[in-house]
């Protein structure tokens, strides 16, 4: 995070927002959320 802060010339909060809102993190988060939804559905159906 220190590198991101330096590169963007932002404080910790601003650097975290920039880091976690990048397209690659968005895709990773959507994949993770979908995988968790599928696991929950499988558990509910007893698979």
Image (cartoon, rainbow, N blue to C red):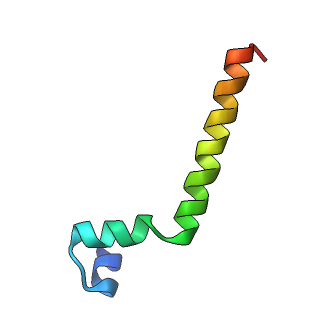
> Number of callouts in the render?
0
Q: Which residue, as the protein is rendered here, is positioned at the far right? A: 47
For the question of whether residue 20 can be seen, the reply is yes
Residue at horizontal 35%, vertical 77%? 4
> What is the quadrant of residue 34 in the picture?
top right
Q: Which residue, as the protein is rendered here, is positioned at the far top? A: 46
> On the rendered structure, is 4 left or right of 28?
left
Q: Position of residue 31 (x, y in %)?
A: 64, 51
Q: State the residue in front, 5 or 34.
A: 34
Q: Position of residue 10 (x, y in %)?
A: 24, 80
Query: Vertical placement of 12 versus 7: above or below?
Result: above
> On the rendered structure, is 27 left or right of 4?
right
> What is the quadrant of residue 11 in the picture?
bottom left
Q: Quadrant of the C terminus?
A: top right
> What is the quadrant of residue 43 in the picture?
top right
For the question of whether residue 1 can be seen, the reply is no
Q: Quadrant of the N terminus?
A: bottom left
Q: State the residue in front, 6 or 47.
A: 47
Q: Position of residue 13 (x, y in %)?
A: 24, 66
Q: Which residue, as the protein is rendered here, is positioned at the far left? A: 11
Query: Vertical placement of 45 versus 3: above or below?
Result: above
Residue at horizontal 41%, vertical 69%? 19
Residue at horizontal 73%, vertical 23%? 42
């Amino acid at each position: 995070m220190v590198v991101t802060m330096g590169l963007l010339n932002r404080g910790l909060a601003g650097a975290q927002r920039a880091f976690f809102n990048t397209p690659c993190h968005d895709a990773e988060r959507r994949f993770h959320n979908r995988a968790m939804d599928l696991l929950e559905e499988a558990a509910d159906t007893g698979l």
